[in-house]
Amino acid sequence: GRDIALQLSARITRLATARKSLPQLHASQSSTVVMTSYNGVFFVVRDGDRGVLVEVYNMSPDPAVLSVDEFPCVVTPVDLISGDELNFGDQVHIPGFASWWLLPR
């Protein structure tokens, strides 16, 4: 009960803070959806005069494994929503229902 509510509140606060700090999410930025080889996993690339942001979404309950080569660009492996450093090697393990916001290197 209460622990879940606190976790949810903390996640929403982190999301709002990340959203506020990213000019790439402005409505004037163009967005392109890039599908991957894994069903249910896709990227949204926001690109424009305010910079580039790569959003990663796994809409499946199942974890996915992608080659790092499938990413639309080389990214810094730090999720801007959670602040977590992600473990990127030649393959990237994406948990079920994950959403990551990443900046290019």
Image (tube, grey):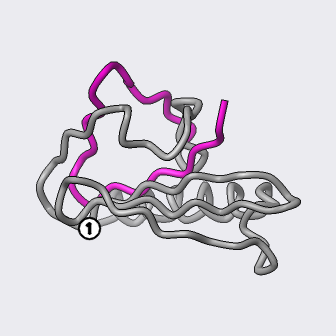
Q: Nearer the viewer, residue 90 or 88?
A: 90
Which residue is rendered at x = 65% and y = 42% of the image? 103
Is residue 67 shown left or right of residue 19? Answer: left
Q: Is residue 73 magenta?
A: no
Give percent across and percent down for residue 9.
51, 64
Task: Tell me residue 104's x, y (percent).
Answer: 65, 38
Q: Which residues are magenta?
A: 83-105
Name which residue lies at 22% across and 66% down: 40
| Position of the C terminus by quadrant | top right
Q: Residue at point 40% right, 66% down?
A: 5
Badge 1 is on which residue? 59
Residue at left 76%, top 71%? 29
**Residue type beneath disc 1:** Met
Q: Main secondary structure of the magenta part?
A: loop
Given residues 105 and 20, the one toward you in this image is: 105
* Above or below for 31 versus 4: below
Nearest to the observer: residue 66 or residue 84: 66
Characterize the local packing of mark 1: few (<14), some (14-19) or many (20 or more) Cα atoms within 10 angstroms: some
105 sits left or right of 68 in the view:
right
**Considering the numbered disc 1 on the image, is that residue within a helix, a strand or a loop?**
loop
In the visual, does 59 lie left or right of 51?
left
Q: Is residue 27 above or below residue 57?
A: below
Q: Which residue of the protein is positioned furthest toward the top in this rendering?
A: 89
Outermost residue toward the left? 62
Q: Residue furthest right?
A: 49
Please identify the residue farthest to the bottom as the structure is shown.
27
